[in-house]
Image (cartoon, helix red, strand yellow):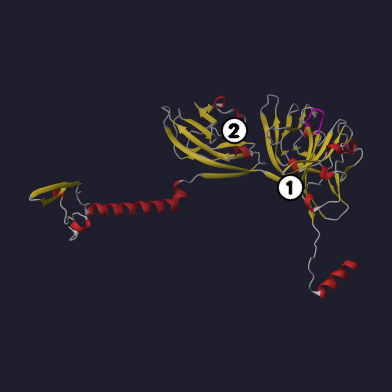
Amino acid sequence: MKTDALETGDLSLNLTKLHLSDSGSYTCTVRWLSRGLKRELRVTDVQLQVKAPFPSWAKAFLVLLVLGLLVSGALYLHFRQYFMSVYQVEVDSRAESVQLPCKTTVHLPEAAKVVWEDSSIFNRKVHVYQNGSDQPEEQDRCYRGRTEMKRKLLEPGDLSLTLKYPTDRDSKTYTCTIYNSEGHILMMKPVVLKVKVYQVEVDSEVKSVQLPCKTTVHLPEDTKVEWRDSSIFNRKVHVYQNGSDQPKQQHIYYRGRTEMKRNQLEPGDLSLTLKYLTDWDRGTYTCTVYNREKHILRKKQVVLNVKDCQVEVEEGEESVQLPFRTTPDLPEDAKVEWYRYKLSYRRVHLYENRSDQPEKQDQDYKDRTEMKKYLLKTGDLSLTLKYPKETDTGKYWSRVYNKDGDILRVKTVKLKVKGRIQIKDQTDPTLSRLLMADQSV
């Protein structure tokens, strides 16, 4: 105990060289004489538990175990590509087909079942082979008519799957699993497929662009060719059936803007020409060819990227034009609206009921905008903005609606108005003279 324990009140006891037998209850009691009588005060009770020391061999074992785990982890990270190796296949979306390899070196029992599945959330069956033949009724309809396996595939050799008309939606992992008659897995092989989609990039002011789709075989006369976009509505861009175009089947947004070559059912060209492009035409376009039973005969994709329309002008110019040219002969009751967002919606110009509506435009643009006459007839929906100023910089949108409120055309124009440089302090007389001389010139 401390020598000044009674003075400080710290009555703690320090017990050294502990043994297991020291475990137990310890009581601190203070006794003293008062007026000739013995007094006693029980201060506290303390429970002491002495644990057995950790054996040295166990410490060594733990150290070796930790080291072993660290080494194993390092080896796994270094060689993980060997432990987790998955065969990868890359193909262009214009290819007719792609093969997903799966090979074996042993004979499989006649009752074996071969199942190809994809890695979608539904784990769809891509192809099933059992009892010596394909089982198309078991495969997901997304893959019907698009898969093929070699004959006599249970012999040592090839269980590979041929997938026809690959698109970007087919980019995923495919697993080939072989089961015996009891449903036990005999073999499993994953293959990663990546489909690269052909890309076309054009300027926003070009008159037209061609989206390629070619075939090397004759197509039946009752074939249907359908082009669709990648919007959430999966709109029909162009339809060809019964030997002619079907404009009534295409979405109103594309009417008058598409064209396909004649005799497209002959081996050759199913390409689509898209006219009067805007940035709103960006996306993936899919050409699908169906037979009379609506089975897919061909499927091709192309990604279209339309560059932004950008206009630049200096502050102080009399006017600037925001270009927008589309198909002529728009409906007479069409409405054309130019607007922009700058903290809030602002209407720049409105053409409705065959005339401008200046009372419905934002005050900041009053008497500063102008559109051409007969704009619906000519298809020139460009907007002239007068006396451009630096605060006019931003994005401008134009939309064309029919009487039912359907959007017929859309375009975005990015405007940049450069402010004029003002020199507030010209301390160098030589610089001042040079600037004055330059201005006079």
Q: Amino acid at mark 2?
A: Thr
Mark 1 Cα within 10 Å, few/some/many (few <14, many 20+)?
Answer: few
Looking at the picture, tell me which residue is in the foreground, 407 or 317. Answer: 317
Predominant SS along the magenta part: loop
Q: Between disc 2 and disc 1, whose residue precedes?
A: 2
Q: Nearer the viewer, residue 317 or 48?
A: 48
Left or right, 78 with reference to 200: left
Q: Quadrant of residue 260?
A: top right
Q: Is residue 221 left or right of residue 191?
A: right
What residue is rendered at 81% in x and 73% in y?
A: 431
The residue pinned by badge 2 equals 147
The picture places residue 198, in percent across and down from the top left corner, at 68, 44
Instruction: For the C terminus, give its image quadrant.
Output: bottom right
Q: Quadrant of residue 237?
A: top right
Q: Nearer the viewer, residue 418 or 29?
A: 29
Amino acid type, residue under disc 1 in the picture: Glu
Give above or below for 428 relative to 171: below
* Stretch in magenta: 401-406
Q: Is residue 289 above or below residue 50?
A: above
How far apart, in angstroms, are the residues tagged by discs 2 and 1?
Answer: 32 Å
Residue occupying image coordinates x 35% and y 51% = 69
Query: How far from the left and from the top, in percent, is residue 331?
Result: 86, 31
Residue 19 in the image: state x and y as whole percent: 15, 52
Q: Quadrant of the N terminus?
A: bottom left
Q: Tag 1, which secondary structure?
A: strand
Q: Is residue 390 magenta?
A: no
Residue 260 seen anywhere in this rendered image of the structure: no
Image location (x, y in percent) of residue 355: 89, 35
The residue that disc 1 covers is 201
